[in-house]
Image: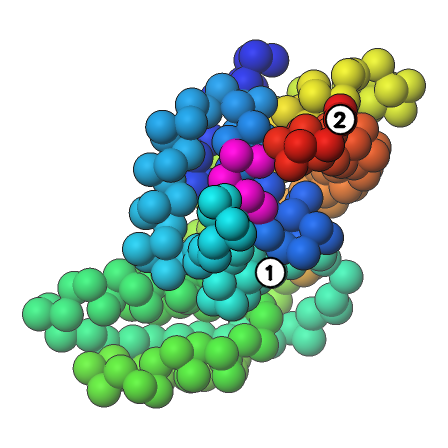
Amino acid sequence: MPGRDGVVGVKARALVFDLFGDYLRGRDGAVRLRGLVALMDCFGVPESTVRVAVTRLRKEGWLTSRRDGRETTYLLTEDAWRLLDERRSRLFHRGGEAWDGQWRMAIYSVPESERALREQLRKQLSWLGFGPLSSSVWVSPRDTLEQLRAHAEHQPAIRLDIFHTESEGRAADLDIAARAWDLTALDRGYARLLDHYRPLLPGYRAGTLTERDALVERMRLLHDYRMYPLRDPDLPAELLPAGWPGPASHQVFLEAHELLRVPAEAWVDQLLGATAGSPV
């Protein structure tokens, strides 16, 4: 896990998205440049890097800006909010759906000349909860076929065949899940998260962190946890090995994220108030 002096290894652009998602949405979804610079300084990001990051995010269509007197104010675009909401839904809403016992199988072919398109399709399959049994045969226990069809229908180079099928029984289902997803690596990752954050919960409950440290810690928590749900297809319980630590990790994440919310938001209010000319 990262050290306590900053959020190590988090890119500036990811921090910008997380600040909007966790703290700026309820503040009109906008932030002045100097306010953003002050917030990013909490994570050891210098002003020059902040300026480069927002410039790139504007060019890529994720940020827009307006002039407020001599100040520049930044806002996320609609596409950026949509992407942020999709990813945050994956982080905060896990499990709970019963499985109907049916596998959805997608078999695709893409011409060798369309390698970029093939990679884009694989990323979309993974995002929709599919896992590869082979390079062009992907399976999922979830019914996300309409989203997959919508992604492929405007790409004539993609040939897509879709099937509903059942396996020979529970042993076969478990084998399919183990082959299509690296559950062992996910298990180890979730276990590390639990080992790190579960012992910290009593301190979070007692309010031992300063407001600034709570902001940094909450962002570190978000960064540490995010990589797992984005790789975890959120399989039904019937397809998971005994003692699967995913649900326990999710509950620890939710509790820690909420416990740190009030002091972290208080520090954001102070920083933004100070940079707007209000007394801290």
Q: Is residue 131 magenta?
A: no
- For label 2, the SS is loop
Give the total number of marks visible in the rendering. Answer: 2
Amino acid at pointer 1:
Asp
Residue 120 position within the rendered picture, expressed as x and y whole percent measured from the top left: 30, 64
Q: Position of residue 164 (x, y in %)?
A: 51, 82
Quadrant in which residue 226 is drawn? top right
Q: Residue furthest front?
A: 69
Q: Residue at x 48, y 63 (%)?
A: 77
C-alpha gap between disc 1 and disc 2: 33 Å
Of helix, strand and loop, which one carries label 1? helix
Question: Which residue is at the front of the view, 259 or 98?
Answer: 259
Camera-nearest residue between 247 and 256:
256
Which of the image's four quarters has the C terminus?
top right
Query: Which residue is labeled 1 in the image?
Result: 85
Quadrant where the N terminus sits is: top right
Is any atom of residue 36 visible in this view?
yes
Q: Residue furthest left?
A: 113
The segment highlighted magenta reads 31-35
Q: Nearer the viewer, mark 1 or mark 2?
A: 2
Q: Position of residue 14 (x, y in %)?
A: 47, 41
Residue 216 vs residue 7: left or right? right
Pointer 2 residue: 279
Tag shown at residue 164: none
Q: Position of residue 20 (x, y in %)?
A: 59, 48
Amino acid type of the residue tagged 2 in the rendering: Pro
| Quadrant of the rendered image containing residue 210 | top right
